[in-house]
């Protein structure tokens, strides 16, 4: 994860996508801009800290008082059941701008 101090002050951060779990929306090697938030709704793509997988980027399936259920959209992504519920305080931010992969 790369968070320039001036960008963090604005409530945004960049993540480089690793893996194909969110393809085709986010391809491996692409960068994505996220806005810091703990509030996530179904359909949002979020970055979150997962107890087993570290920092992940997934789509919100549902949100309850206990947290959010997440899923990947790419083939072979970790199942929603295996991801389990991620507490709201572990949601880092919501995707605002996917940047195209340039091949380098």
Image (cartoon, rainbow, N blue to C red):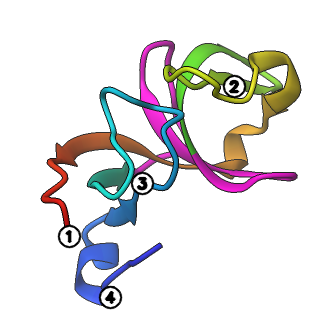
Q: Closer to the camera: disc 1 or disc 3?
A: 1
Q: CA distance from mark 1 to mark 2?
A: 33 Å
Residue at position x 33%, y 65% in the image: 14
Residue at position x 40%, y 78% in the image: 2
Dividing the picture into quadrants, the one containing residue 103 is: bottom left
Pointer 3: what residue?
17
Q: Secondary structure at mark 1?
A: loop
Q: Are marks 4 and 3 in contact (CB under 8 Å)?
A: no
Q: Which contiguous range is marked in magenta?
A: 36-56
Q: CA distance from mark 2 to mark 3?
A: 21 Å
* Residue most extreme to the bottom: 5
The verdict on residue 96 being magenta is no
Q: Earlier in the sequence, mark 2 or mark 4?
A: 4
Q: Earlier in the sequence, mark 4 or mark 3?
A: 4
The verdict on residue 37 being magenta is yes
Locate residue 42, reporting x and y percent. 50, 13
Task: Say whether residue 52 is left or right of residue 38.
Answer: right
Q: Residues within 10 Å of mark 1 (few under 14, many from 20)?
A: few
Q: Secondary structure at mark 3?
A: loop
Pointer 4: what residue?
5
In the image, 7 versus 17, the foreground residue is 17
Q: State whether residue 64 is above or below residue 1.
A: above
Pointer 1: what residue?
104
Pointer 2: what residue?
68
């Amino acid at each position: 994860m790369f968070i320039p101090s001036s960008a963090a002050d604005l409530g945004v951060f960049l993540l480089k996508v690793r893996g194909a779990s969110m393809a085709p929306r986010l391809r491996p090697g692409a960068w994505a801009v996220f806005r810091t938030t703990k509030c996530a709704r179904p359909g949002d793509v979020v970055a979150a800290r997962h107890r087993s997988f570290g920092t992940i980027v997934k789509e919100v399936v549902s949100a309850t008082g206990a947290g959010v259920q997440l899923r990947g959209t790419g083939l072979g992504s970790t199942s929603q059941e295996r991801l389990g519920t991620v507490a709201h305080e572990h949601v880092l931010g919501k995707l605002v701008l996917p940047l195209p992969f340039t091949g380098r």
